[in-house]
Amino acid sequence: MFKSLKLTCDQATTICDKNQYGEASLLDKVKLNIHFITCKICFKYTKQNMTLTKLYKGHAKRCKEMKHCLSDEEKNALKRELEKINK
């Protein structure tokens, strides 16, 4: 019975990634937590992965709130540069 709960590190990282997107099943989560008991490297990977995801989501939220538009001067400069390249 316990053999079915055993994961390789490769499988554990896959489940970790699925878990971050809400795609991991309850059984997958149980297997992952059992794997963490014996493998501190995968535990650290998961912790770092969660931290990076939180940072990215925070940055993405701020980025969406900002308006990213070129000024007319910047647009004209870009057009001139493109015209130089196309000649």
Image (tube, rainbow, N blue to C red):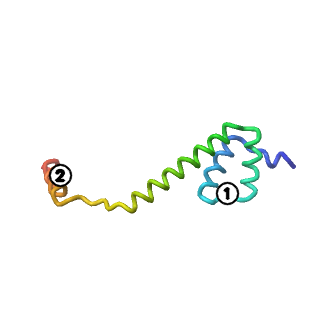
* Mark seen at residue 24: 1
The picture places residue 3, in percent across and down from the top left corner, at: 83, 45
Q: Earlier in the sequence, mark 2 or mark 1?
A: 1
Crowd band around label 2 with a 10 angstrom C-alpha radius: few (<14), some (14–19), many (20+): few
* Mark seen at residue 82: 2
The picture places residue 72, in percent across and down from the top left corner, at: 17, 60
Residue drawn at 66 percent across, 51 percent down? 15
Quick one: which residue is furthest to the right in this view? 1
Crowd band around label 1 with a 10 angstrom C-alpha radius: few (<14), some (14–19), many (20+): some
Residue type beneath disc 1: Ala
Q: Quadrant of residue 71?
A: bottom left
The picture places residue 14, in percent across and down from the top left corner, at: 64, 48
Q: Nearer the viewer, residue 1 or 56?
A: 56
Residue drawn at 64 percent across, 40 percent down? 44
Element assignment for label 2: helix
Residue drawn at 76 percent across, 53 percent down? 30
